Amino acid sequence: MDINEKRPTKRDETQMVPQPVKGEKGLVNVDTTWGIIQPMQVAKGVRTIDEIEVNEFREKGLPIIDARTPGFYDVSTILGAKNIPHNEITERMGELDRGQPSIFFCNGPQCPQSPWAIHNLLEAGFPPEKILYYRGGMHDWVTLGLPLENKKQ
C-alpha cells in the first residue's frame, strides 16, 4: 500500500503552511491532510539538506529559492529567499548562479513545487551538484519557529 493512502482524508479547505494559534506564542496548527509525501532524495546528484544547513548557507549568502507560487511567497517566506515559481524556473534559469549552489524549497515534505522546479532545471541541463533541496520547506521551518519575512508588508 502506498504511504499516501494511509494518511487522513483531505479536508475541503486545506492549510498548506502551518498557522499560528491566536494568543498562543510559539504554537501552530498543522494540516496533515493535503499533498503527496515527496521522497527524501529528489533526484540523482541533488543533495537534500536540513534546517541547520539552510541557516548556515543563508548566513554565507547562498541563494535561497522559494519555488512556490507568488500567493504563498507573498504571505511569508524564509528570511532572504527569492521567489522563482516552479512553473517559471526554466524561463528564469538565467537568474541562477551556476558558480554556486542554490537552495530550493516549497511548502514542505508533502509539496511537489520544489521537486517540479528541480526536475525542470535538471532537464534543462542545470548541474545537479549546484542544487540543494530543502525538503522540510515552510512546513518544518514554521513548526521549528525559525525566522520568516512577510513580503506584503
Image (tube, grey):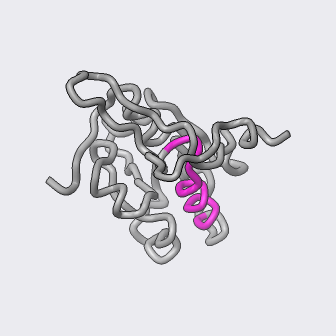
Q: Residue furthest left?
A: 153
Q: Is residue 136 visible?
A: yes
Q: Write the residue at 51% across / 42% down.
A: 108
Coordinates of residue 84 in the picture (x, y in percent):
40, 64
Q: Is residue 40 left or right of residue 103?
A: right
Q: Write the residue at 42% across / 41% down.
A: 138
Nearest the viewer among 33 and 116 is 33
Residue 39 falls in image quadrant: top right
Q: Is residue 56 visible?
A: no
Q: Residue furthest right?
A: 1
Q: Write the residue at 27% across / 39% down.
A: 148
Residue 113 within the magenta-colored segment of the rendering: yes
Coordinates of residue 128 in the picture (x, y in percent):
62, 54
Residue 126 falls in image quadrant: bottom right
Q: Which residues are magenta?
A: 108-121
**Dominant secondary structure of the magenta stretch?**
helix
State whether residue 83 is above or below residue 54.
below
Nearest the viewer among 40 and 63 is 40
Q: Is residue 21 left or right of residue 8?
A: left
Nearest the viewer among 63 and 23 is 23
